Image (cartoon, rainbow, N blue to C red):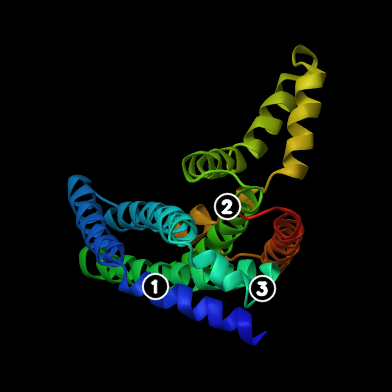
Amino acid sequence: MRSVLTIARLSLLESLRNRLFVGMLIFLLLFLGFAIYVATLSLDAADRYLQNTGMLGISLINLAVVILFGLYSLYQEKDRKELFVLLNRVSRGAYLLGRFLGTAAVLALFSLLAGCGVLLVTWLFGDLLAPALLWAVYWALLEFTLLTAVALLFYAAGIGFTLNALLVLAVYVVGHSLVEAVRSFIGLGMFGNPYHLMMVQVLTYVLPNFEMFNFRLAIVHGDTIALSRFGLATAYWLAYVTAILAAAAAIFNRRDVQ
């Protein structure tokens, strides 16, 4: 466990020293400014525009963190031959878990900064103090740590950076579309293709369902999230992340690292 925490700490420190970290902070400030500008264009309900645009910003920033701090740093470490030194000292499973926890820490940091920023601009420019916005930080953390685990699985399988990044984006988009696709096929009824419906339903079990963590409308409208949905989404995240990281470790242990 000590080796896992050491890898996680080194991963976090590397991210904090990276110039991209400052760039992401600048992007966050610019996006908050964009959210304020969009809100000024509305005749009313400026607070809802700020909340919706702000939560979109949280997702975009975390998606960039997964690719730039989670993935890109992995491949850089491999190119600099540092990976071989680390794998001589720690197990491959511990290395992957440490990198996962390190990226999760960076995601938590940016999610919290973005969430507090959205809360602040909503209060100052939308005349609404909405502490429920901080729940968006929690759901974003679950969503994008799950996406990080998927990226690590592709990395363990030996997929290159460019293709890995594209696959991560594809999984993210599809993971937000599967539920709607199933509803569309069911809505077609007898006019729909049953084989297409079956294929989509199978994909909903294989690919991560990111709609499990989508509570934007509930947060904006101030609706109470039932404890059952809260627990189900958290349990789903825990089971899925554990399974993916276990699969990634098994694949990584059997592959020759070159």
Marks counted in the figure total 3
Residue 94 tag number: 3
Question: Distance from label 2 to label 3 (Cα)?
Answer: 16 Å
Left or right, 30 with reference to 150: left
| Residue holding disc 1 | 14
Tell us which disc is closer to us: 1 or 2.
1
Left or right, 232 with reference to 103: right
Farthest residue in the bottom direction? 2
Q: Earlier in the sequence, mark 1 or mark 2?
A: 1
Question: Distance from label 1 to label 2 (Cα)?
Answer: 19 Å
Q: Earlier in the sequence, mark 2 or mark 3?
A: 3
Give coordinates of residue 39: x percent, y percent: 23, 51
Task: Give above or below for 48 relative to 10.
Answer: above
Name the residue type under label 2: Ala
Quarter-of-image position of residue 83: bottom right
Tell us which disc is closer to us: 2 or 3.
3
Name the residue type under label 1: Glu
- Name which residue lies at 71% across and 32% down: 182
Task: Give above or below for 247 relative to 238.
Answer: above
Give coordinates of residue 6: x percent, y percent: 55, 83
Question: Distance from label 3 to label 1 (Cα)?
Answer: 18 Å
| Residue holding disc 2 | 151
Characterize the local packing of mark 3: few (<14), some (14-19) or many (20 or more) Cα atoms within 10 angstroms.
many
Quarter-of-image position of residue 146: bottom right
Residue 26 in view here: yes
Q: Secondary structure at mark 2?
A: helix
Closest to the observer, 115 or 160: 160
Residue 130 in view here: no
For the N terminus, the quadrant is bottom right
Q: Earlier in the sequence, mark 3 or mark 1?
A: 1
